[in-house]
Image: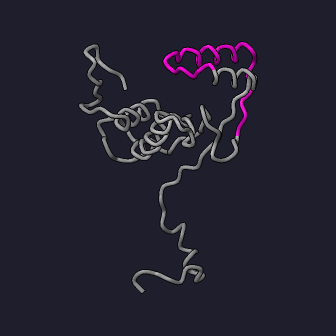
Amino acid sequence: MDQQANGEPSAIEGFTGLQNSFTYFLRQIRPTQVFVPTINDLHPDHKVTNEQLQISLFHSTGDIWPELGAPLDAVPAIHELAIYCDFPEPPTLRIASNETTFEKQLTAIAAFTSQKQIAKLIEHVRNAGPQEYVRTISFCFYQPETYHHLFQDSKYPNRIGR
């Protein structure tokens, strides 16, 4: 979250927080795809970013907080990036680049000097070469009818309210 010169969090439409900020920027940018660290990552910032972005995608497509902009017409495709930990399931896309772009990627990773163990990540990325793996994840709003068939064939005969 951005901070003002005095160290106070910057407010958007009078409010602060990741969901407010993510919803605002999603509605302003209107992406068709978003990239986020995998939920499987153990780094707390990466986990929180994944969780907060997904709930913000829900907010961004609805009528909540109209002051943050017009709702998105559809949920963008969501892609996870493995940072420190493997994906929970195999990746679905491989992105290959050239050496110039790869060196820029390594330089960008190295810019996170506050991360004391960043050298190990850079070593792994360098050894893997100019390719990145991505996992597209499914984002579906809850729809009870999805589960109707489970109870129509008596697979689960015990029902509350019988």
Q: Is residue 22 left or right of residue 106?
A: left
Number of numbered labels in the structure image: 0
Q: Nearer the viewer, residue 43 or 82?
A: 43
The residue under the point 59% across, 39% down is 79
Image coloring type: one colour
In percent of width and height, residue 18 lies at 37, 35
Q: Is residue 44 left or right of residue 14?
A: right
Which residue is outermost to the bottom?
A: 162
In percent of width and height, residue 48 lies at 45, 38
Quarter where residue 104 is shown: top right
Q: Is residue 45 above or below residue 3?
A: below
Q: Nearer the viewer, residue 120 or 18?
A: 120
The residue under the point 61% across, 37% down is 85
Q: Is residue 114 on the magenta stretch?
A: yes
The residue under the point 37% across, 26% down is 1
Q: Is residue 155 above or below residue 15?
A: below
Q: What residue span does the magenta drawing correspond to?
A: 93-119
The residue under the point 53% across, 38% down is 42
